[in-house]
Image (cartoon, rainbow, N blue to C red):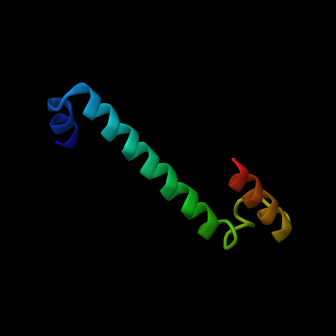
Amino acid sequence: MIISTLKSQSSSSYVIILVSIITALSLLGDSVLYIVLPVYWKGAGLDSIWQVGILLAINRFI
């Protein structure tokens, strides 16, 4: 339904909306990473909590 509505618009607005949706999902995933990783660090295969800090710091630079 949403895709057919987007395709009916002009090509440039379709690209802008698509990029904005992808960006929003990426930001949501980044925010979830900062919430979930410190809580479930053992489930992620990390050995200690300092590794969580290193991973989140590297993620912030990227």
Left or right position of 44 against 30: right
Quadrant where the N terminus is found in the figure: top left
| Residue at (60% x, 70% y) in the render | 35
Q: For the point 69% across and 47% down, which residue is it?
A: 62
Instruction: State the residue in front, 12 or 50.
Output: 12
Location of residue 15 (image quadrant) = top left
Residue situated furthest front in the rendering: 12
Q: Position of residue 54 (x, y in %)?
A: 81, 60
Q: Is residue 9 left or right of residue 49?
A: left
Examine the rendering and report whether any part of residue 48 can be seen.
Answer: no
| Rendered position, 29 above or below 20 | below
Residue 49 located left or right of residue 25: right
In the displayed structure, 18 sits above or below 59; it is: above
Q: Residue 13 at what x, y percent from top left?
A: 26, 34
Which residue is drawn at the image coordinates 81% and 70% (left, top)? 49
Q: Residue furthest top?
A: 11
Report how many numbered discs are placed on residues in the image.
Answer: 0
Q: Nearer the viewer, residue 4 or 18?
A: 18
Residue 24 rendering spot, x and y as whole percentages: 43, 52
Can I make out residue 9 in this image?
Answer: yes
Question: Which image quarter: residue 12?
Answer: top left
